[in-house]
Image (cartoon, rainbow, N blue to C red):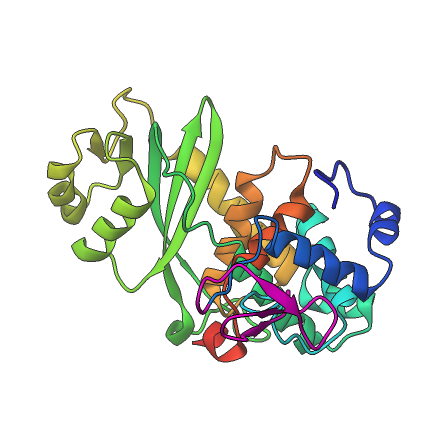
Amino acid sequence: MESRFENLTIFQFQKLFPDADVCLQYLADIKWKDGYSCPKCNHTRYCKGKNHLDRQCTRCHYLESPTAGTIFHKIKFNLLTAFWIVYYVSNHKKGLSSCELSRKLGLRQKTCWLFKQKIMQAMNETDAEKLSGEVEIEEIVMGPKRAGTSEKPRDKEKLVILAIEKRGKGASRITAKVVESTSKKELEAFLENKIEKESEILTKKWPVYEHISRDYPNMVCGKSKRGKKPFTLKDRVIMGLRAWIRGTHHHITLVQSYLHEYCYRFNRHIQKTGIFEEMVERMMHHEPAPYKIIIA
């Protein structure tokens, strides 16, 4: 397995992954790179299973495939096609819609949509380093538009909390989460999970933020400490997010999934190597995401 992919072109991809067997071997190398350990009894000895590259525990006889327990588990189409979807989604600068993937690969649009949703699940940065330094917070409303109009169905609108980590005059990293309301409980949970407590946090001058600021010594509600007009950066980030959705996906229903993708892309805008490799590894370490869980 290549230690690192640098500027993986479409021709290099074709050469590295000519068929499904090579793809399966690649997944097996990732899954058992640190050695085999039975997920049931932790035994480290195994024998060959029924199918190619399967491993069976010699103690409890548990049979495991390279894709078991991962997002690739029980996919309904060729594994090579799945790799092509991951390649297009991860390497395309602005991402691809399921309709575009369907045209490129000759699959049904719903099939591409579902597998892309699984990729977006793996883009969720739950264990990412918290935002720090100067952080701006904004609340926005997102949701699908009514067909033929510019109006959004209010029953499908989602409230989103967006946090932006500033570096110089630009944004370094962002994170966003769909919340039920701007209650103290929801906002405190978001701050605790996403932002370092000692950060200089800029928020709106709302009573709920003023109450929360008692626990955050550097929180400023309503204006920055420097006396400048607040939230000039967040406007650009929000416009970029909305423009990306309109240009690439046109509309969205599962808002949080698309926020995962946008934040993942934004936070890796400087990264030039290993994007495909990192995405496959993320999918291998993510639990299966069946349709019922995705739409829940």
In terms of secondary structure, what is the magenta stretch mainly? loop
Q: Is 26 positioned to the left or the right of 250 in the image?
A: right
Residue 104: % across, % down? 82, 65
Range shown magenta: 40-66
Assign the C terminus to one quadrant of the image: bottom left
Decide which of 232, 31 is in the foreground and name it: 31
Q: Is 17 positioned to the left or the right of 97 in the image?
A: right
- Does the magenta-highlighted stretch encompass residue 61? yes
> At x 75% / y 42%, what residue is drawn?
2
Residue 164: % across, % down? 40, 38
Q: Quadrant of residue 215?
A: top left
Q: Is 101 positioned to the left or the right of 16 in the image?
A: left
Q: Is residue 180 above or below residue 124?
A: below
Q: Is residue 226 above or below residue 95?
A: above
* Residue 183 appears in the rendering: no
> At x 46% / y 49%, what residue is drawn?
125
Q: How many marks?
A: 0
Decide which of 10, 31 is in the foreground and name it: 31
Residue 265: % across, % down? 58, 45
> At x 77% / y 66%, what residue is drawn?
81
* Residue 141 appears in the rendering: yes
Decide which of 151, 42 is in the foreground and name it: 42
> At x 53% / y 68%, what residue is drawn?
69
Q: Is residue 184 above or below residue 146?
A: above
Q: Quadrant of residue 153?
A: bottom left
Decide which of 122, 30 is in the foreground and name it: 30
Q: Is 279 positioned to the left or the right of 257 in the image?
A: right
